[in-house]
Each structure stands twice: as structure tokens, then as C-alpha cells.
Amino acid sequence: MLSVAAGLALSGAVPALAAGDAVHPPEMSWSFSGPFGTYDRAQLQRGFKVYREVCSSCHALSRVAFRNLAEPGGPEFSADQVKALAAEYQVQDGPNDAGDMFDRPGLASDRFPSPFPNEQAARASNGGAYPPDFSLLAKARTYTRGFPTFLFDIFTLYQEQGPDLIHAILVGYEDAPEGVTVQPGQHYNKYFPGHLIAMPKPLADGQVEFPKGEDGRAVVPETVDQYARDVTAFMMWAAEPHLEARKALGFKVIIFLIVFAALLYFTKKKIWASSHSGERHS
């Protein structure tokens, strides 16, 4: 999933959508947006389910350890769930006493193993395109919002370009318009830079089964849009697992600075008042 070709492969340079190169993604409403935003735990759990059942066959999550799923601020799986999940994976370890590498069941402290042994194997399995690692993708991707939109972003603290772009690409597959030539192995996506993407449409309605409510129906729609929202939120958490702690600390720092500034003001006022009073007496 999301083999976003070389254009979205993780690299030192962060690609941005040039003006006129692609349609700007619609601005989505995310629970984690804004200065007081937080992650939706249920959404993160659904997003992980989409990642595991659809995305993990191509995309690594190499910077995330199994135990991170149980940490505060994340999907908050139980310790037993994490141990059971880790044990389902085979992790390479070693060398042993004979100097050989060996496979063993995963531990909670292990990171998610890559689906491919190396980049060359990944490209060979994906028609030459390298499926990017999901660990940092939501923070690494962006696009140019242009003037004057970026000025409003400063005041609204809009920082969700990456999630908006990823969600848009996942739902942006269409038939190519007349006059656009799509080569074999390419697919048309109206939100992808250049519009032609190597990855086939990864999601379909009803593809992943979500938890059911008391009435036997899924708690959220099992649609492409919902899958895209949930897996994008999970990718955002993977890229910034301490987002809630960072925002909470930032709020405390702002309060401290306001109180500190007030104390400085009244201290300065008192000092100068004493100074002026001394000058009058002299």
C-alpha cells in the first residue's frame, strides 16, 4: 500500500506540490489538529488494523517498537495484547554461538520488521518503485499552500499538510481524463504530484472489518474514506507519538511566560516607583 513511487520515497529532500502540478488536498478535520488536539484512541486502533491488514505487506514501520502501541498517547493496547502481537512476527537476531543469524518470535521491545530484506528486494517486488517507510511519512510530506493561505496557517497553527496529502492520495484515484496517457504500471491520481503514481488503488469499501456495536453494525463506515482517515491518523501518531505531551508542555510554558512577564512588569513598576519617590525627596 501507498507505494507512492520515488516521488514520495523518504529522502533528504521533502517533495512539495508545485503550483499547477496537482490539485491541492482538501483540508481535513483531525482530532489531533490545533494547540489542544489529541489522538482518538479508537481511530488509532482502527488505523493500525488497516496498516497491518493492507499496508504492512509493502511498507515498513521500522522506527516503531511493538511496546510503543501500549504507551500513553498512543493506541493504548494492553501489555498482553502487545506481547501476543509481537510473538506473531519473526524477527532476525544473532549472531548465535556459531556466528549465524537466526529468526525468533518477536518481543515487545522489538521494532516492526520490514516486509523486505533490503531496498533492492522492495523495488523488485514493486515494479522499481520503493515503498516508503511509514514511520515518519506523515511529518515528512508536505505541499505548498501558497499566498495568502500560508499567512492564515501561522495564526491558525495549521500543521496537517502531511496527513491531508496522504489522505487525499489514498482517496484520489480516478480514471485518467481525456488526453492523459497512462503507461502500463501507472495509475492516475488527481492529488499526486504529476498525477501518475506507481501504486494501484490500495483500498476498497468493505476491505477491512471494523469493530461492531451492540446492533451488529460497524461503529464507523467501512469505506475507502474512513480507512484512509484512520490509517493516516495512525501514521501521524507513528511520526509524532509524543504530540499530546508536547502540546501539554507548550501550554504550561505559555502560562509560565505570561505569569513571568506579569511579575517582571510589576517588579519593574515598583522599582521605578521607588526611584522616582527618592528623586522627589532629594
Image (spheres, rainbow, N blue to C red):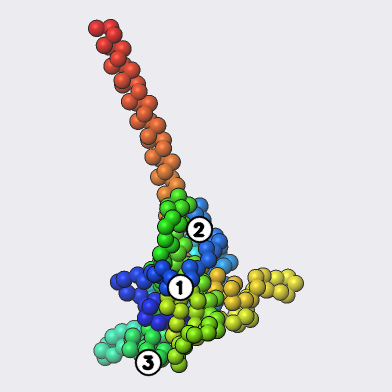
Name the side, left or right, on which 282 lies relative to 190: left
Provide residue 258's location: percent of width, then percent of height.
41, 37
**Residue 33 image label:** 2
Number of numbered discs on residues? 3
Residue 208: which quarter of the image? bottom right
Provide residue 73's location: percent of width, then percent of height.
49, 61
Residue carrying label 3: 124
Residue found 28% across the figure and 7% down from its top: 281
**Number of the front mark, 1 or 3:** 1
Q: Amino acid at mark 1?
A: Ala
Q: Amino acid at mark 3?
A: Ala
Give the distance between the C-alpha atoms of the residues marked 3 and 2, in whole angstroms.
Answer: 38 Å
Q: Amino acid at mark 2?
A: Ser
Inspect this view and state whether residue 33 appears: yes
Per the image, label 3 sits on a secondary structure element best described as helix
**Residue 22 image label:** 1
Sequence order check, earlier mark of 1 and 3:
1
Name the side, left or right, on which 189 lies relative to 256: right
Is 170 situated above or below 278?
A: below
Provide residue 223's location: percent of width, then percent of height.
62, 76
Residue found 54% across the figure and 64% down from its top: 28
Farthest right residue in view: 215
Give the distance between the C-alpha atoms of the residues marked 2 and 1, in whole angstroms.
Answer: 24 Å
Is 266 situated above or below 240?
A: above
Sequence order check, earlier mark of 3 and 2:
2
Is 261 situated above or below 109?
A: above
Q: Nearer the viewer, residue 158 or 90?
A: 158
Q: Are marks 3 and 2 in contact (CB under 8 Å)?
A: no
Sequence order check, earlier mark of 2 and 1:
1
**Residue 77 image label:** none
